[in-house]
């Protein structure tokens, strides 16, 4: 049970801490370079693997659900918030919104694709690895993908649908007299949860470290 609580707690934490880190890092780069163009593109390069996977998740899901994709953009855009502070939007997908259900599925797609990426790394035992360079690349990808699982408040709103989906899945399992406890407490499932928590902890730790450094040095 602790593994599942830790998992959902980290999902919530990674959303907020990654948002803070991205925006503070952009402002720090802007103070150094004095250029919104240079700052936004440095940030875009840093988070590019995660941004690409995120926007492709939106795009592919929208197409699969027969929603017309009007625009897909991987070029960072600098905007101003209500308090007149600059912030950067790393990418976007604009699609035809015909109904709430399909729009929500498109919105939460990056979350499940991100988890799929973690499962891929677990299934093929990519990280940790004996090869130091594979470990370095894996750490970077884990940081980038985890930090990009949610990149907007709109995406976060889409996760509301996860709750009824979980309830529906549990109801179906119970209805077919499937032992839920045995599934969720099996050694295989618990090992997957341990690895997922480790991956998320890496992303949370990386974002937190960057954020703390920026705050300490007031960059």
Image (cartoon, rainbow, N blue to C red):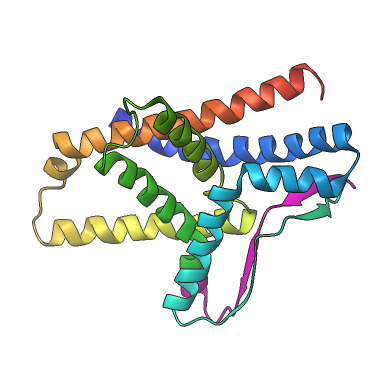
Rendered location of residue 82, percent (x, y): 85, 51
Decide whether residue 125 is among the magenta residues: no
Q: Is residue 150 above or below residue 136?
A: below
Residue 31 occupies which quadrant of the picture?
top right
Decide whether residue 86 is among the magenta residues: yes
Q: Residue at x 86, y 31 (%)?
A: 32
Q: How many marks?
A: 0
Rendered location of residue 157, percent (x, y): 56, 57
Q: Is residue 25 visible?
A: yes
Q: Residue at x 17, y 38 (%)?
A: 188
Rendered location of residue 42, percent (x, y): 73, 43
Horizontal side of 100 relative to 5 (left or right) equals right
Residues drawn in magenta: 84-103
Residue 152 occupies which quadrant of the picture?
bottom right
Q: Nearer the viewer, residue 106 or 122?
A: 122
Q: Nearer the viewer, residue 38 or 115?
A: 38
Horizontal side of 33 relative to 61 (left or right) equals right
Q: Is residue 6 visible?
A: no
Q: Nearer the viewer, residue 67 or 153?
A: 67
Horizontal side of 34 relative to 125 (left or right) equals right
């Amino acid at each position: 049970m602790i593994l599942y609580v830790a998992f959902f707690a980290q999902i919530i934490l990674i959303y907020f801490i990654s948002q803070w880190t991205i925006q503070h890092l952009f402002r720090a780069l802007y103070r150094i370079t004095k250029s919104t163009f240079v700052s936004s593109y440095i940030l875009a390069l840093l988070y590019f693997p995660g941004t690409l996977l995120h926007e492709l998740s939106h795009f592919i899901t929208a197409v699969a659900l027969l929603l017309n994709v009007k625009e897909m953009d991987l070029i960072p855009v600098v905007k101003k918030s209500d308090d007149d502070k600059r912030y950067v939007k790393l990418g976007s997908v604009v699609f035809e919104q015909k109904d709430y259900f399909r729009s929500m599925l498109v919105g939460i797609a990056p979350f499940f694709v991100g988890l799929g990426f973690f499962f891929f790394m677990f299934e093929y035992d990519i990280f940790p690895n004996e090869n130091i360079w594979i470990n370095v690349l894996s750490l970077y990808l884990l940081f980038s993908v985890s930090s990009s699982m949610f990149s907007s408040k709109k995406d976060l709103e889409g996760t509301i649908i996860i709750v009824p989906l979980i309830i529906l899945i549990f109801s179906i399992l119970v209805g077919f007299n499937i032992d839920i406890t045995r599934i969720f407490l099996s050694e295989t499932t618990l090992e997957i949860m341990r690895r997922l928590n480790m991956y998320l902890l890496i992303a949370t730790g990386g974002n937190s470290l960057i954020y703390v450094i920026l705050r300490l040095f007031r960059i």
